Image: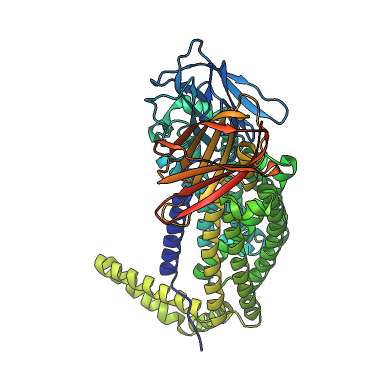
Amino acid sequence: MTTTAPRLGTALARLLILAAALLGTLLAGAAPASAHAALTGSDPKDGAVVATAPKEVNLTFSEQVAMSPDSIRVLDPAGRRADTGEIRDLCSGSIVRYGVGLRAGLPDGTYTVAWQTVSADSHPISGAFTFSIGAPSTTSVALPDRTAGGGLVGALYGIARYVSYAGFAVLVGGGAFVLACWPRGASVRPVQQTVVRGWLALTGATLAMLLLRSPYTGSGELSDAFDLAGLKAVLETKTGAALTSRLLLLGAAALFVAVLFGAYARRTDPKEKKDLSFGLGLGGTVVAAGIAGTWALAEHASTGLQPGIAMPVDIVHLLAVAAWLGGLTVLLVSLYKAPSVERSAVERFSKVAFGAVAVLAATGIYQSWRQVGSWSALTGTRYGQLLLVKIGLMCVLIGIAWISRRWTQRLADTKPTGETGEGEEAGEAGEGGEAEEGEEAEQNGAEAADPERAAQLARQRAAVATARRKRERDADPERAGLRRSVLTEAAVAVVLLAVTTVLTSTEPGRTEEEAARGSAASGPAAVPDRPVDIRLPFDTGGVDGKGVVRLSLDPGRTGANALHLFVERPNGKPLDVPEIKVAFTLEAKNVGPLPVAPDRIQTGHWSASGVQIPMPGEWRIQVTVRTSDIDQTTIEKNVKIG
């Protein structure tokens, strides 16, 4: 029984709707701050109450960041600047620390520290916290709701990132498909249009990212996209240099495309075509690797663990993605728009895709180890969870590719429709050539006499041509099956690319765990006159039952201590809970549990004074959080006190 392939227009429309819906969902679900660096500590710490005003405020990060004069701001209870505005570089070895001096004679009260910077892999990060001098007080400073890299500008920048990846894949993969698999495709107009559109998409997206970069990492206002001073500042950064280099390389890519679809397509001499093919392949590989390098040199691979190995691996990974997914796109267009595509071309692409998948597996394993680092991060962080989704999609894609390969093998055993059609058409032309010439002359005369009749005849010719192409397309059931499997493969590839785009703008699992250990690791050593700070994620299982408890014990030594608890939602906003209780236990000495019932100060903030720690040691702190009448949970952490 012969089956027919789906109509291209309907299928592509569904594909675009699926891609847009998925991309919107992923971008909406992504954390607003696309952070690859993280704040691991501060002095004074968040929520700390110090006896006298410190001389400066220090911030420690998990990796290198780019600081500007306004990256750290300290505001007094009235909202006035309390810092000197002079950023100090306190980095030492692998410790990334920056500070800002405070003005002399600061009065008692609660001060707000707001910071915003750009991590080494180009992603903006921001945050805010408070500390108090003498005693906490009311403050008129509202912590900012908008995080760096969020809002409309963040969404547009994320879309531009997605389009740039897609454009790169189509441009590079499409060119490789023509050169390595289907040289005749260089003269096929739909193939030409697809590759050129890939170039246009990548160029347009790169220009958009260059203009949006200043508001994306700064004000967040779309109107600042055309601020010349901001654009100049962007051009002086590593990311700005990478985007500018990409535009220059795209100029070379335009020359490659012009030669591929011009001189190369017109060559008829086999030797000349082979020589030109070699030159295009060599030059195209260099240009493609250079464009891929603009991502590797400015983003994720350029910082963190083993950057010298990670950057070349990232370039190879991107080229393999382009060879597979970009080639798949051009193959799909060819199967629908040029049904006479040779079987040998499909077979060659099948081998190229198999090699690309092998490269992706090898480079992907290394990248996963580098960015995740542990099994707990694989399942317990957003990056790890997205990576699992990507791995699942890859498995689905490989399965569909295997089905496409089976269709290709079946296709190789059948006589191509194009050959049969050409013979039949030649015979028909020989038998009825004179009649057609007469009809054509008659039609030309009618068209000259009646423009309306001419338009009607043109529509009829177009309909006949469309029907003939459809008959050619649907005549071979093997080709129809191959088209359906390739279309499905392309749809999954669109989803996979969307997940990858979100993954590249998500804080790596290794970084997230290191930041958690730095600020809330089990058993942090308490320093005299410094509070003990820990973070305790919780999930009561009910509605609005997930969040984090930040606990601060000041001064973190034996004797009387002030206890502060801050209950937050996963997005960092305060969470009001009906009840929270704390207990201290020193198991080594059989002391405790010592219960503490803190008082509610304001939404999400609980406090207790005079908490007695009778002796130093490894204390287990248990926090019980109740989010409703029936939903509660107890979380604990061991800390060294005294």
Locate residue 637: give its quadrant: top right
Locate residue 525: give its quadrant: top right
Can the viewer see residue 294 in this picture? no
Q: Residue most toward the bottom?
A: 1
Please, is residue 370 above or below residue 94 in the view?
below
Percent from the top left, x then y, of residue 412? Answer: 65, 79
For the C terminus, the image quarter is top right
Front residue of 249 and 224: 224
Q: Residue most toward the top?
A: 105
Instruction: Answer left or right for 404 relative to 440.
Output: right
**Count of numbered marks:** 0
Can the viewer see residue 139 in this picture? yes
Please, is residue 519 above or below residue 138 in the view?
below
Front residue of 296 and 53: 53
Percent from the top left, x then y, of residue 310? Answer: 71, 45
Instruction: Answer left or right for 551 relative to 152.
Output: right
Percent from the top left, x then y, of residue 337? Answer: 49, 68
Front residue of 537 and 298: 537
Percent from the top left, x then y, of residue 496? Answer: 55, 59
The colour scheme of the drawn protein is rainbow
Front residue of 61 and 633: 633
